[in-house]
Amino acid sequence: MTSVLTRPSKGGIPLWVNLMQGALILIMAAQVVELFFDHDALAEAGLSTEGDPSLNLLYTTGARLTVMIIISAFVMVTQNATQYIVVLIMNVAREGFEMIIDPLYPVANAAAPPIVDFAIHVVIVSIELAALVTVTRIQRREVA
């Protein structure tokens, strides 16, 4: 008997992978809103929001996250395992870099101390790697 979380969706992607990807999309969307519209929160975190160079960095980062959201949402709709692998690699790389960068350069109003932030990212990256392995196995079965 399969669990509702491991039961494949119409495209063979397990529900837990889709739920994880949905949560990541929501996290990225919150970051996009902050980067585009909530400069007060960014200033409180210690980020410069004054001047063209700072705004260029903020808006470029927001635009890149928006593209990641669009691609991630598209892959969730198509449920194509090969496309999903690309998105999962993107997620692992992004969170992997954040796992190192966030503790080394914490923001002023960080929700957690650097070591806790690192541990949280280790958990997130581990879940993403499990999803990548799962979807890679599905993709290999589809190709075979």
Image: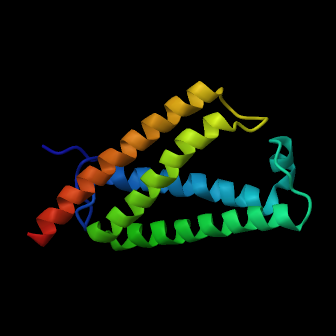
* Residue 127 screen position, x and y as percent: 37, 42
Q: Which one is in front, 97 or 18? A: 97
Indicate left or right for 59 with 80 as reference.
right
Q: Is residue 80 visible?
A: no
On the image, which quarter does residue 36 sit in?
Answer: bottom right
Query: Residue 135 appears at what percent x and percent y?
Result: 26, 57
Q: Is residue 89 visible?
A: yes
Q: Is residue 143 above or below residue 32?
A: below
Which quarter shows the C terminus? bottom left
Task: Please state which of residues 21 and 136 is positioned toward the viewer in this rendering.
Answer: 136
Q: Split into 4 quadrants, where in the image is the N terminus?
A: top left
The answer to whether 117 is drawn above or below residue 135 in the figure is above
Q: Position of residue 91 (x, y in %)?
A: 46, 55
Asked if residue 93 is positioned above or below residue 139 in the image, the reply reads above
The colour scheme of the drawn protein is: rainbow
Q: How many marks?
A: 0
In the picture as drawn, the residue positioned furthest to the left comes out as 144
Q: Is residue 59 left or right of residue 65?
A: right
**Residue located at (81% from left, 55% from top):** 38
Q: Nearer the viewer, residue 103 or 73?
A: 103
Tell me the residue at 87%/56% (across/down): 49
Residue at figure coordinates x 75%, y 55% from the top left:
34
Outermost residue toward the right in this view: 50
Q: Which residue is located at x 44 percent, y 73 percent?
A: 74
Residue 133 drawn above or below residue 117: below
Q: Residue 112 placed where, x, y %?
A: 65, 29
